Image (tube, coloured by chain):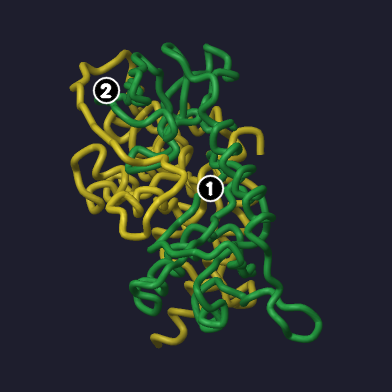
Amino acid sequence: MEKSKRQYEIMSDHRSEGFWKEDPEGSLAGRHLVSAETFAADDWQASPNRKLSKMMFTIAQEQPERFLELVGYLPFSVQDIFLQYYLLGRTQEQIGELLECGQTAVWQNLRAGITEMARVIAGDEVERKEGEQQKAIVKVYSSSVGSFVLSIDDRSLDLHFSPGTIDGAVRRGE
Amino acid sequence: MLLTQGTGWTSGSRWAMIEVTDESRIEEIVLHIIRWVRKNLEGEPFQLLFPVKNRQIGGVTMDSPYLFMRTKDLHDLENLRGIYGVQGLVKDGKGELVTLSQRWMNKLIARVKGNARDWYCGIRQGSFVRVIYGPQRMLCGEVIKLHRNGMAEVRVGLKVRELRLKAPVKALFNMDHVPKGERNYYYNGE
């Protein structure tokens, strides 16, 4: 039974990916029914989180104005997470450190935010966030990055090699 | 970027070329090499040229497809091949290491250093910039103050907070070519 369920998930994922490429918004809104038995299994495997993230990356890349419009329905703090993660390719750790909330909270907000966007696409009544929020001012000091010659024992060495997300940043115009 | 350990180079010392498997992961590869050096060449003179042409939203663009390294004995570098992302040292048809003179390398190093200067050239108060190093990497903001010691104060306006970053000008990328109406902290063009 366990083997059959896994096969079903694989076929379902494969079909979902196909629908996604044809109609990203419709897929998120759940307009397509998937009949797993119709299609052959393939070896594409991804966790549900990774799949959702790839879907959102595709929207940001292929429909940037729509992506920004959808982001506008999220709470301001979550908007900052989405904009950094998808448009700038900053990692969850980097975002969490900047917003002082931790990587786990960033991940949870990404998932919750995608769910909220799916509701907007499906036509649910969701309030768009307007105006600006009062902002705290945070001062940060970064003294030694940017030197051309660096000792491999330099404490700032790691700061010169910050990683990005798996998919990288969505680049404008691509 | 020129990474170093120790001193004591002779005028005749030569450099080896390292071929990598995937330029898109070059920063990870360089970090792995550094860890290997710390473990296997502890206390010995070593230099690694990481020839970066550009650092932008799309990642690092290399000025050359190779990394360049020198140690007291270049044959010590044969074991680099086992490192993640390293294809191996460049050799000729006879299997001999291809090496480069210090004179040739000085020209390359000068060029790579010039590339880095191009990124922050022209930055002034009011400039739109992108942070390219450190935990605030890729964020964009406005330079609100330039200090004579080479430090800049940058304002980054997120939705929920305003960041006031003090960083070397060398850690910034001049983005003054971006139209004023498109300048925001999440600008993702080059």
Query: Camera-side residue: A128 or B166?
Result: B166
Q: Is residue B64 above or below residue A172?
A: below
Residue A82 position in % (x across, y down): 39, 38
Regarding residue B147, the answer to whether it shows in the image is: yes
Query: Camera-side residue: A135 or B60?
Result: B60
Dot 2, crowdedness within 10 Å: few (<14), some or many (≥20)? Answer: some
Relative to B31, is A126 on the left or the right? Answer: left
Regarding residue B156, the answer to whether it shows in the image is: no
Say which residue appears at 39% left-offset and 26% top-offset.
A72
> Please, which residue is most extreme toward the right here?
B93
Q: Do callouts 1 and 2 point to residues on the same chain?
A: no
Chain in yellow, by letter, is: A
Residue A100 position in % (x across, y down): 19, 40
Q: Is residue B53 above or below residue A137?
A: below
* Label 1 vs label 2, nearer the camera: 2
Could you say whether the residue bearing mark 1 is in a helix, strand or loop?
A: loop
Relative to A88, is B20 on the left or the right? Answer: right
Chain in green, by letter, is: B
Q: Quadrant of the C terminus of chain B?
A: top right
Query: Camera-side residue: A93 or B173?
Result: B173
Residues marked 1 and 2 touching at CB (< 8 Å): no
Relative to B21, is A119 on the left or the right? Answer: left
Give the letter of the chain under mark 1.
A
Q: Is residue B119 above or below residue A165?
A: above
Q: Which residue is mark 2?
A: B162
Residue B21 position in % (x across, y down): 62, 70
